[in-house]
Amino acid sequence: MKTTLQRASLAALVFTLGCNSTPVPATTPPVTTPPVDAAAVVTRPPEVTPTPVTEIPGHEVLAQDRTPKEPPRLMPAETLIRSYITLFGGLSPQALQVRLRGATSDNLFDTWGDYLSALGVPDYGVDIPRAPQTNALMLAAFERIGVALCERAVQNDLRGAVATNDRVLFRFELPAGGRALTDEEFGARFDVLHRRILGYPAALAPESRVPRFRALYQGAVTRHADAGARSFNGPEAGWASVCEGLVRHPEFHLY
């Protein structure tokens, strides 16, 4: 009995001392920062060089499917109209209409309103839907606008006193005295038109493209050697024909 009372008194004493004692705060070890070398040069990790498929083991003779997955589709008429506007220097449609009509009454171009339905633009006010595919009238409208664009550009660029960098299409000079172009001279000038109208260098086109357009140019020059009452001389008619051939090209109308 006495032993039990002693143990209880001892436990009570320990409890009392524990409650009255001041807690010791926990200490956090200091954080040490490694020294920084001011002369050290920070370099980027090495770039990963792409590996061609043929260099991967087992892929040396892997066939690549380059066939088109969809047939060519016609550009929306609004996109083609925007292309014509851009080619002529970014004019407004009304200003471009005035430029295409010209100062003479040669009926080369009428008004945009005369061509919108033929180009396939819908008119929901009178319940005319968008043309789902090409037709003879649409191709004739493309033909008329392309001819007007190229012939007005010849008159503006090659006949007018316009600086080369300010021209809309023909940003090059013709040989002095009507001298015939060499193949290299034609190729350099044709590349300017090809980039401007089709959007990529002529060197990336099929190999037959430059010779075929060279023959087109030379044929027009020969037929207009004696211009007489015609509006264009030989070189002017040649470049007008080349321009008309490019704006009629399927790559200009399809995607």
Image (cartoon, helix red, strand yellow):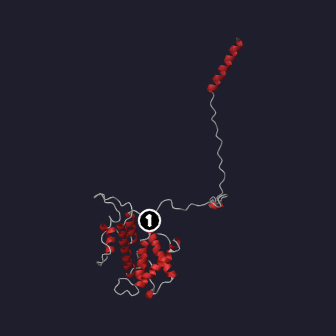
- Tell me the quadrant of the picture where the C terminus can be found: bottom left
Disc 1 marks which amino acid?
A: Leu
107 or 24: which is nearer to us? 107
Q: Residue most toward the front?
A: 136
The residue to which callout 1 is attached is: 254
Horizontal side of residue 223 vs 125, given as left or right: right
Give the total number of marks visible in the rendering.
1
Of residues 143 and 243, the one nearer the viewer is 143
Q: Residue 122, located in which quarter of the rendered image?
A: bottom left
Q: Quadrant of the N terminus?
A: top right
**Residue 83 location, x and y as percent?**
40, 67
Residue 172 in the figure: left or right of residue 94: right
Image height of 207 relative to 40, above or below: below
Depicted 141 relative to depicted 181: above or below: above
**Which residue lies at the image location 64% right of the left edge and 26% below the top edge?**
18
Q: Nearer the viewer, residue 186 or 25?
A: 186
Asked if residue 101 shows in the view, the reply is yes
User: Is 3 above or below relative to 92?
Assistant: above
| SS category of the residue bearing label 1 | loop
Q: In percent of the image, x 37 and y 68: which residue is there?
A: 139
Q: Is residue 49 visible?
A: no
Residue 233 position by quadrant: bottom left
- Most extreme residue toward the top, as rendered? 1
Dot 1 alpha-carbon crowd within 10 angstroms: few under 14, some 14 to 19, many 20 or more: few
Q: Position of residue 214 (x, y in %)?
A: 48, 79
The quarter of the displayed image where residue 150 is located: bottom left
Residue 5 image point, x, y percent: 68, 14
Q: Position of residue 174 (x, y in %)?
A: 44, 83
Instruction: Say left or right for 214 vs 88.
Output: right
